[in-house]
Amino acid sequence: MVHRTEPAENAEVTERFRIVGTVGAAVFPGWITRHAGRLGLRSSVVSQDAGVLEVLVAGRAALVDAMALGCSLGPQEVLVDEVLRERRNHGDTQESPTTNA
């Protein structure tokens, strides 16, 4: 029997992205919110400084994957070195995305 550890493509997931690099540009949080909304995802920026931007993203697993790829490219004002992803539990009410742009 094979056990699948990744969610099905259509499964609902919530992930915390830690976007590392030169990511302090003021336009980046709005860029993330707009692109998440275009994908039908919920998102919430948790924190941002010059070197790390943290955001919660929720929605279909395949679209969260697409959002991670988009964040790795970012707008021209940022230079992303890596996107670290952490799966969140759906029962975790302390952190859940709040916007669906």
Image (spheres, grey):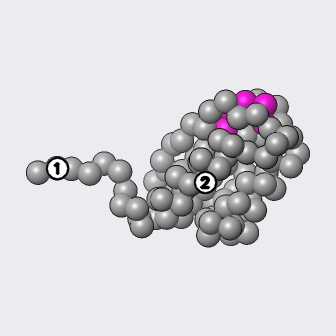
Q: Earlier in the sequence, mark 2 or mark 1?
A: 1
Mark 1: amino acid: Val
Q: Residue furthest left?
A: 1
Q: Residue at x 65, y 50 (%)?
A: 70
Residue 40 in view in this figure:
yes
Horizontal relation, residue 5 to residue 56: left or right: left
Give me the C-alpha separation between circle 2 and circle 1. 28 Å
Q: Which mark is residue 2?
A: 1
Q: Secondary structure at mark 2?
A: helix
Image-quadrant location for residue 24:
top right
At horizontal 73% and vertical 69% (from top left) the residue drawn is: 101
Residue at x 79%, y 51% (from the top left corner): 29
Q: Nearer the viewer, residue 60 or 74?
A: 74
Report whether residue 98 is seen.
Answer: no
47, above or below 58, in the image:
above
Q: Main secondary structure of the magenta part?
A: strand
Say which element carries label 1. Answer: loop
To which residue does mark 2 refer? Answer: 67
The residue under the point 67% across, 61% down is 36
- Find out whether the residues at labels 2 and 1 contact each other: C-beta distance under 8 Å: no
Q: Residues within 10 Å of mark 2 (few under 14, many from 20)?
A: many
Provide the residue span drawn in magenta. Answer: 19-23
